[in-house]
Image: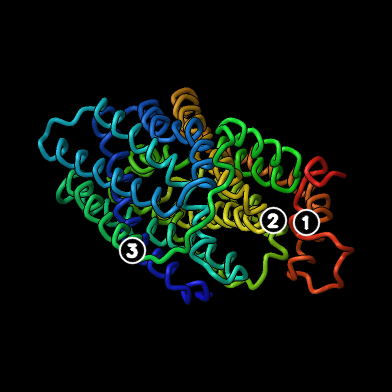
Amino acid sequence: MLRALRHRNYRLFFIGQGISLIGTWMQSIAAIWLVYRLTHSALMLGLIAFLSQIPILLVSPFAGVLGDRLGRLRIMIIMQILAMLQAFIFAGITLAGVIQVWHIGALSLFLGIVNAFEMPTRQAFVIEMVEDKSDLGNAIALNSALFNASRLVGPSVAGIVVALAGEGVCFTLNGLSYLAALAALFLMRIPSRKAVKQGVRIFSEIREGLVYIMNFSPIRDLILIVAIMSLVAMSFPVLLPIFASRILHGQSNTYGFLVASSGVGALAGTLFLAMRKSVLGLGRVINAALLMFGSGLVAFSFSHSVMLSMALLVFVGFGMIAAMASCNTIVQTIVEEEKRGRVMSFYVMAFMGLSPFGSILAGSVSSAIGAPGTVRIGGILCIIGGVLFALRLPSIRRIIRPIYRQMGIIPEVAIGMQTADELRKPPEYAGN
C-alpha cells in the first residue's frame, strides 16, 4: 500500500505536502467560516468560492503548456512561495482586525491564480518523482490519501483553533506550513527533462491537447465524468456551514467535524485504491463510487442529526474520492507523455475549474430552495451520471485494453507491431 514511498523524491514530496496540506485545510475552513460570520449569506459563500476557483478554468491550459515545456519542479517552488505570502498577508489583516469581505475575495482570487498554475503541474509532476512507472497508480492513490488525511486533521483542528483563538491564527499556521513543502522541493534531485516544442505557439499547443482529448474517447469520457461531478455535486462543502448552524444547530466545531467526516470517507477511499495492485477494474470502481456519492448526498440532505450526518458524509467522501482518483489514475496511465501536462491541465479544469460555477450555482439555488434541496438535486444528478457512465463502460474497455496489453498490465500475447504510444493516439494522430 505504501510502495511508492520507496522513491526518495516522492517520499520528500509526501512528507512536505502532508504538513503543508494540513495548514491549507485550516485556512480554507477558517476563511469559509469567517465569510459566513461576517455576512451570514449563502450567496456570499458561493461567490467567495467562485473567486478562488475561477482562475483554474481560465489559466490552467497555459499552466499545462508550461509544464510540458519547462521544469515542473521550478514551477512548483515559485507557486509555493506565492501561496505562503498570501497566507501571511491574510493572517496580518485578520489579526489586525481590519479584515473585510472584499479582502477575502481579493486574496481568494490571488490564491486561485496560484493554484491554477500549481495544480496541473503537481498532477503531472508525480511521474517525475516515481522512477518505477508501475508505482504510478499507487503514488496517485497516496497523493489522494495524503490530501484527505489532511482534510481529516485540518478542519478538526481549524474548528478548535477558530473557537479558541480566531481565524487569523489558522492563516498564520498555514503560512508556516509552506516551509515544509519548500524544504522538500529544494531537497529533491530531479533529472533534467528535455524541453518540448519550444518554437510552437502556446495556443497551438493548447489546441493540440484539446483535440487529442476530444478524439481519444476514454480520456474524454473520464474528464466528462469529473466535470459533471464538479459542476452539480461537489459544491456541497460550500453549504456545510448552513447545515452546521441552521439545520444541526451547531457552531464552528460542528462545521469542522462535518468536513472531517467526509475526509474520513475520502481517506478510506484512497487507502482502498492504494491497496489495489493494478489499474484493472477501476472502471467498475468509478461506476459504484458515483452511485455511492450521489446516494449519500441525497440521504444527507434529509438528515437532522449530527451523528447521522457525519456517518453519511463518510460514504459521500468515499464515493467522491474513489471516483475522482480512479479517473485520475486511468487518465495518467493511458495518456501520451508529451501531452501529459496539457491533458492534466484539462483534467484539473474539469475537477476544479467548473467548481466555481457549481459553487455560485449552489449558493444561488440554496438561497431560493434551501441547502437541503440543493444538495439533494446534486446527488440525484450524480446518480444519473453514474448510470450514463455504466452505459459507456464497455466502449471504454474495448479501447484501453489493447494499451494495457502493450504496457504489460494485461499479461497477454502482444498485439501486432503497434506500440503503446500508437495505441493511445486518436485516428488522425495514428494515421489511421
Name the spot of residue 330 as percent of width and height, x first: 66, 56
- What amino acid is at disc 2? Ile
Identity of the residue drawn at 40% across and 63% down = 13
Q: Nearer the N terminus, badge 3 or badge 2?
A: 3
Relative to 215, is 80 above or below?
A: below
Judge the density around disc 3: few (<14), some (14-19), many (≥20) Cα neighbours within 10 Å.
many
Q: Is residue 332 left or right of residue 414?
A: left
The residue identified by callout 3 is 184
Q: Nearer the N terminus, badge 2 or badge 1?
A: 2
Closer to the camera in the image, 83 or 196 = 196
Identity of the residue drawn at 35% across and 31% down = 109
Relative to 92, is 258 above or below?
A: below
- What amino acid is at disc 3? Ala
Q: Nearer the N terminus, badge 3 or badge 1?
A: 3
For the residues labelled 3 and 2, the Cα–Cα distance comes to: 29 Å
The residue identified by callout 2 is 334
Q: Is residue 43 left or right of residue 172?
A: right
Q: Which mark is residue 400?
A: 1
Q: Is residue 164 left or right of residue 7?
A: left
Q: Which mark is residue 48?
A: none
Helix, strand, or loop for circle 3? helix
For the residues labelled 2 and 1, the Cα–Cα distance comes to: 7 Å
Question: Quick check: marks 2 and 1 in contact, CB under 8 Å?
Answer: yes
Closer to the camera in the image, 286 or 211 = 211
